Amino acid sequence: MRNAILFVVKQLLIFSLVFAFQPVLSAGSEAWAAKPKQTRPETQAKKPAQPAMSFILVRSADCTDDCPEWISAEGLITQATPGRLKKFLKALGDKKVPIVFHSEGGEVNAAYAMGRMIRKGGFETAVGGTRLEGCPLTDMRCKASIAKKGPSTGRSYSGGAYCVSACPLALAGGTSRVASQWAYIGVHQFTTIYSKVTVSYRIEYRMVNGRKQEVSRQEIGRKNAGQSKSTKLGKQAEAVLSAYLTEMGVSQDLIERILSASPETLRLLSSVEAMKLGLLTDMLASNESPGIPLCRADDPASARCHRHADAPAAEPATPAAQPVAAAPVASGG
């Protein structure tokens, strides 16, 4: 009987392959337009990027009794942001207070994760900034005024506050979602970043009946081979976005608004337009501040809350409502 394996040749072969890693979807890999002009639907103003988003529990400085509290969420949404939010909310225990966003966006997948976490937890959301007591205008959330235990003291504001790029996706998670006419909400196309890496392997072969057969393969090195970007929204990414908007009760028409502005510009949405799209459930009156909660049926007339929402608050999402497909990593800055 002829032997199947004639001889074995151990051969070391080093070669390189170029792989394109999973794309990173970003609605805000770069920062845009902190304070765009109200008279223009788009703006190309550019500003330095915010630091990564951080969370602070704040108690209103404008009262002495039964003062409202809110979570100030300010900064760039990164891959680490959902984990930080999860840890922060866990430390709050059963406390349910509004989450007030002031952000130029960031990674789309992270914004999806935040929105689902917020909806599941039953939190309200708003667009607004926060100035802590004792902080200068140049650093309104200064470290010196952040309380080591319990809530910090401060005031929220609408004028000049913004939630743009990927931020509205996280905002959409709120069971109620509010903003005033003085705050900015903006969207634009997602930027998909493809990272290329050269991977080197050491491969061992053996000869079987005169043919090579791979015995083992070991990675021995990686080298960055550059990046490329695309603003084209692929079918998978669009399907994931569509499913998320449906899950959050937001109109599919928001996709058209997103696609209408390049990453270098913003499509600003008025409060009225954002309400029609379902991105907002209510507008704050001129005497109402971001961070005040939606009034409950048994709240007294003197309660510090907003009462004029016509639509019922959204129900918390259940795990079954979440789409199965995985989105590419994106940024919406």
Image (spheres, rainbow, N blue to C red):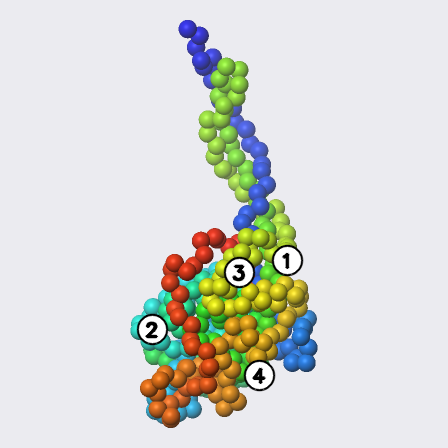
Q: Position of residue 232 (x, y in %)?
A: 63, 56
Q: Residues within 10 Å of mark 1 (few under 14, many from 20)?
A: some
The residue wearing badge 3 is 242
What is the spatial separation of the Cα atoms under label 4 and label 3, in whole angstroms? Answer: 28 Å
In the rendered image, is residue 47 in sight? no
Q: Which mark is residue 231?
A: 1
Percent x, y for residue 164?
57, 71
N-term-proximal mark, 1 vs 4: 4
Marks 2, 4: nearer the viewer: 4
Q: How many marks?
A: 4
- State the CA–CA distance, disc 1 to disc 4: 30 Å
Residue 86 vs residue 54, the one in the foreground: 86
Badges 4 and 3: C-beta atoms under 8 Å apart? no
Nearest to the eye among marks 3 and 1: give it: 3
Label disc, if present, on residue 92 of the rendered structure: 2
Does residue 109 lie above or below 66 as drawn?
A: above
Where disc 2 sits, the SS reads helix
Q: Which residue is mark 4?
A: 182
